[in-house]
Amino acid sequence: MGDRWQVEVDRGVCIGSGMCVNNAPDGFKLDAARQSHPTEPETDANEDILTAAEGCPVEAISIRLPGSGEAVFPPEE
């Protein structure tokens, strides 16, 4: 992919299902309250993180390109 991504989790929406950690264990962690956090706010683009975002049951994960803010996921309509 070659890009860098800015990964965010809306903890007001996150239900702590842990699916993101299962799909991208190096990209996400759950805190004591079972709320998801990206392990790094900016990371190299990778399929595991995209799969985690796409598989989030409440769409709490967003991915943007740093600098431009262009949406990677969810795609802007």
Image (cartoon, grey):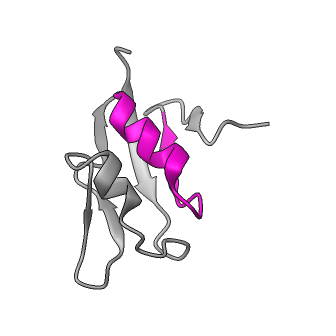
- Residues 23 and 2: in front is 23
> Residue 20 at x, y = what percent?
37, 55
**Dividing the image into 4 quarters, which one contains the N terminus?**
top left
Residue at 51% over, 56% down: 56
Residue at 39% over, 59% down: 19
Name of the residue lying farthest toward the right: 77
Name of the residue lying farthest toward the top: 2
Q: Is residue 20 visible?
A: yes
In this rendering, the count of numbered labels is 0
> Residue 41 at x, y = what percent?
30, 49
Chain part drawn in magenta = 46-64
The verdict on residue 48 being magenta is yes
- Vertical side of 68 occupied by 42: above or below: below
In the image: residue 26, left or right of residue 65: left
Q: Quadrant of residue 21?
A: bottom left
> Residue 36 at x, y = what percent?
35, 67
The verdict on residue 12 being magenta is no
Residue at 53% over, 30% down: 68
**Dividing the image into 4 quarters, which one contains the C terminus?**
top right
Residue at 37% over, 40% down: 49
Q: Is residue 62 visible?
A: no
In the image: residue 68, left or right of residue 20: right
